[in-house]
Amino acid sequence: MLVILIGDQLLSPQQVCQSCLLADRSGQPRWNQGRLRCGHAIHKLSESQPDQYECQMGFRIANIE
């Protein structure tokens, strides 16, 4: 499940990506085969952290399983 990290808050992508020009037609981040297509991976500080990405709009996205 993808979540948007803003400070100490977790938001659903629907709350943020809905108005993004880079989102797909359904207002979701462009996520395909385990990769964020509208951003890039961020280096993890530890293996226990979920995979994190930074979208082109500057938001941090985490893949929580």
Image (cartoon, rainbow, N blue to C red):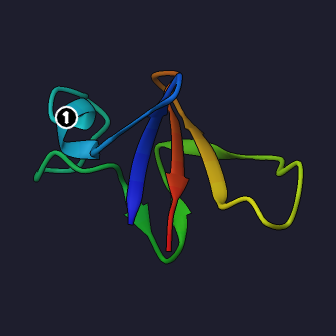
Q: Residue furthest front?
A: 8
- Residue 13 is situated, as x and y percent measured from the top left of the image, at 28, 44
Q: Residue at x 66, y 61 (%)?
A: 50
- Residue 58 is situated, as x and y percent measured from the top left of the image, at 53, 22
Q: Camera-side residue: 35 or 4?
A: 4
Q: Is residue 16 above or below residue 13?
A: above
- Amino acid marked by disc 1: Gln
Q: Residue at x 79, y 66 (%)?
A: 48
Q: Residue furthest left?
A: 26
- Residue 26 is situated, as x and y percent measured from the top left of the image, at 11, 53
Q: Is residue 35 above or below residue 41?
A: below
- The residue at which mark 1 appears reads as 15
Q: Residue at x 25, y 36 (%)?
A: 17
What crowding class fits label 1: few (fewer than 14 Cα within 10 Å), some (14-19), or many (20 or more)? few
| Quadrant occupied by the N terminus | bottom left
Q: Camera-side residue: 39 or 1?
A: 1
Q: Is residue 8 above or below residue 4?
A: above
Q: Is residue 49 above or below residue 39?
A: below
Residue 14 located left or right of residue 43: left
Q: Secondary structure at mark 1?
A: helix
- Residue 34 is situated, as x and y percent measured from the top left of the image, at 53, 73
Residue 21 located left or right of residue 47: left
Report the label total: 1
Q: Residue at x 83, y 47 (%)?
A: 43
Q: Camera-side residue: 62 or 26?
A: 62
Rendered image quadrant of residue 9: top left
